[in-house]
Amino acid sequence: MRLYFVRHGQSTNNLLFDQTGQYDGRVSDPELTETGQAQAKAVAAWLRDGDRGADRVSTTRNADMPMPTNEKRPGGVGAFGVTHLYTSLMTRAMATADAISAALGLRPVGLVDAFEMGGLYLMNAETGVQQPEPGKGRTAITARFPRMVLPASVGEEGWHAGRPYEVPADRPARARRVLDSLLAAHPEGDCVVLVSHGEFFKHFLAATLNAPTFEQAWIAMNNCAVARFDFLGDRHAPFVDVGFINRAHFMPAHLLT
């Protein structure tokens, strides 16, 4: 399985932090900004067309090595033969996946466990306690994103309903579950796009590398940047080829956040 991990586009919470350095006034399930919407369209166009027409095309090897040709691979769509599209059910991720869906003609499949660390919550300003939020329900999601395919577990009460605030100790195991579910579902030859989140990525990366968690580190992933992993051989213990991390050469400079 080849997997492209795509971080969502800039959200209103991302912009708030960029402008103020803090999250006072954050919302639990933010929308994309106009910049985030443009970023989503840029990564969608790149997945469809490859480097053809990209704002900048890298010429060095290793982390920035040029991508494959623009010819479609058997069984997939777009420049890189994408066969499956998955997304977190947070709004900013679904909106990013929706742009990719429109470009590739693939229906995005919601993964309940692919949410950002902590989950959906608001901070009580008086007590400092994180208060979980239920998230969007089935009807609200499908009305907004009609191409979305939702698991049966998503009901009207909200996809995050009943979940507590996720403490740090529980986060690595959830990332491992997401990775294992994808490996179990997709043989070598499938090409998967997963739209998720920046902090989730560092736990997903640790699971991918069978490495200790990166609790004392931040692994940079710009909005709508891409990481690529090839899982080769035995799906239970694959050899992992890390093609690149935080690649956004296709993004015009004014959209980099």
Image (cartoon, rainbow, N blue to C red):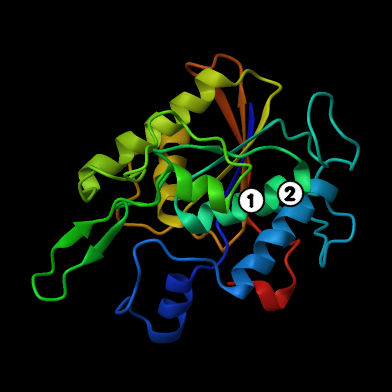
> Which residue: 55% across, 57% down?
8
Residue sticking out furthest to the left: 127
Mark 2 Cα shell of 10 Å, populated few (<14), some (14-19), many (≥20): some
In the rendering, at what x and y percent does residue 69 appear? 89, 41
Residue sticking out furthest to the bottom: 20
Discs 1, 2 touching: Cβ within 8 Å:
yes
Picture quarter with the N terminus: top right
Type of the residue with mark 1? Asp
Can you tell which mark lies on residue 143?
Answer: none
Q: Can residue 245 be seen in this view?
A: no
In this rendering, position of residue 155 left or right of residue 102 = left
* Residue hosting label 1: 98
Say which of 212 and 131 sits in front: 131
> Which residue: 81% across, 41% down?
78
> Which residue: 34% across, 36% down?
174
Say which of 181 and 142 sits in front: 142
Question: In whole angstroms, how far apart are the C-alphas of marks 1 and 2?
Answer: 6 Å
Can you tell which mark lies on residue 102?
Answer: 2
In the rendering, at what x and y percent does residue 221 appear? 53, 59
In this rendering, position of residue 86 left or right of residue 81 = left
In the rendering, at what x and y percent does residue 3 appear? 62, 36
In the rendering, at what x and y percent does residue 179 appear? 46, 31
Picture quarter with the C terminus: bottom right
Label 1's element? helix
Type of the residue with mark 2? Ala
Residue 156 vs 223, above or below: the answer is: above
Mark 1 Cα shell of 10 Å, populated few (<14), some (14-19), many (≥20): many
Q: Quadrant of residue 212?
A: top left
Q: Is residue 150 visible?
A: yes
Label 2's element? helix
